[in-house]
Image: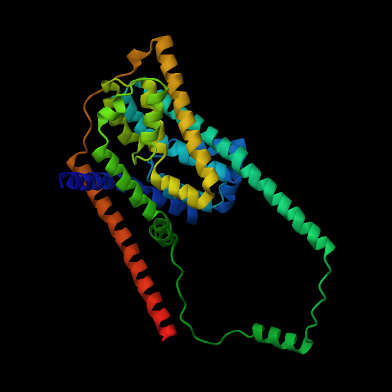
Amino acid sequence: MSDIILLGQNFLALFMESAPWLLLGLLVAGVMHELVPVSFLEKHMGSASFGSISKAAIIGAPLPLCSCGVIPAALGLRRSGASKSSTISFLVSTPETGVDSVSVSYALLGPLYAIVRPVAAIVSAIYAGLMVRFFAEHHEQVEQMQSESKVATSSCCGSKPEPEIVNKSETDTQCTANEIPHQHNHPVQRKPSKVAKVLSYASGKLLEDIVVWLLIGLVLAAAIKTWVPTNFLTQWGDGLVAMLVMALIGIPMYICATASTPLAVGFLAAGLSPGAVLVFLMAGPATNVSTMGMIKQEMGVKTLMLYLFSVISASIGFGYALNYIVSTFSLSSMITTQSHIHEHGSHIQIIYGLCAALLAGLMLRLGVKKLLSYRQNQAQQSACCS
């Protein structure tokens, strides 16, 4: 019973911690969907070129969005015209680093991590985008060209359809009727403002698309926090096994770059190598169950597999590189482990609580609407059958 209570407490804590950033991500996505011209996104991120992938990584790196807030932002980016590869690049760089996480890294882990984290985030994002470009989008383009050539060949060999004979008098009558303006005095409906459209899209369709995976991810993260002890993560010490364990544990966790930093302090103090800690700092924020569900739904299983492979391989590669740099150039003095963990002040806790209440209200509203719609459909079906 105590474990269930602890699970609920961890879930509520994670929900409160992620609520403001998720709301921020929804707002950013709504702004992009309604206010940013599609032509602008198509120009800068619509192609699968190296330039578009790099722009997506650089634009996403400083944004203060965590692994929860980046989901709606990336979804809005994708639906506004960004290519798969650019969207994946944005998905990797944005949660792995940010202005806030760099400052926290400098305060808790020292200047070396403050430098390495943004560099690793941008490079790994470009790498992930290129993987999707070459192994997912390229094959899709080839298949599309082949299907188009088959259609063109079949249309050339086929017979042309006979032109349809249209009665001229009927056409003239229809044109005349269409030219007559309507005389009904309908009240003029005011169009919703841009702000209303942004809020409606962000709290409606977009939240509806991610809410299930969001809750699944939070529950799984709370379960890991409840039942996976810290000594399980630190018992592996150094090397490839330790890095793989940190990557596999970090993938399903629901944690942002800033919140992962105090955990990294504990891992360093427990004896993990700087490289293994960097693996956790990269893989943890960049991936979670909600993000994986969104990628699978919007971009397919192949893109999801490439995304996971890229995040794991890049984080392990940078982990080995950091260990080598620290040992070769004796940079241990640039790594500190401030053992204290910053707690939110009372005013910040109030803000987090209000954001959590707002997010829960929006989710509850969606659930009620779904339930009412389901009951209405059931009533209509029963009426038709009777």
Task: Residue 252 in the image: state x and y as whole percent.
Answer: 37, 40
Is 49 left, or right, of 222 in this rendering?
A: right
118 up-or-down from 366: above or below: above
Residue drawn at x 21%, y 27% is 340
Answer above or below: position of 67 versus 191: above
> Foreground residue, 377 or 45?
377
Q: Is residue 127 placed above or below 176 in the rendered structure?
A: above
Left or right: residue 59 versus residue 163 is: left
Left or right, residue 85 beside residue 283: right
Which quadrant of the view contains residue 179?
bottom right
The image shows residue 29 at horizontal and vertical percentages of 44, 51
Please tell me which residue lies in front, 223 or 340: 223
Query: Is any atom of residue 25 visible in this view?
Result: yes
Picture residue at 34% right of the left edge, 45% below the top? 21
Work out whether residue 370 or residue 36 is closer to the camera in this orientation and state it.
370
- Residue at the far left in the pictured view: 2
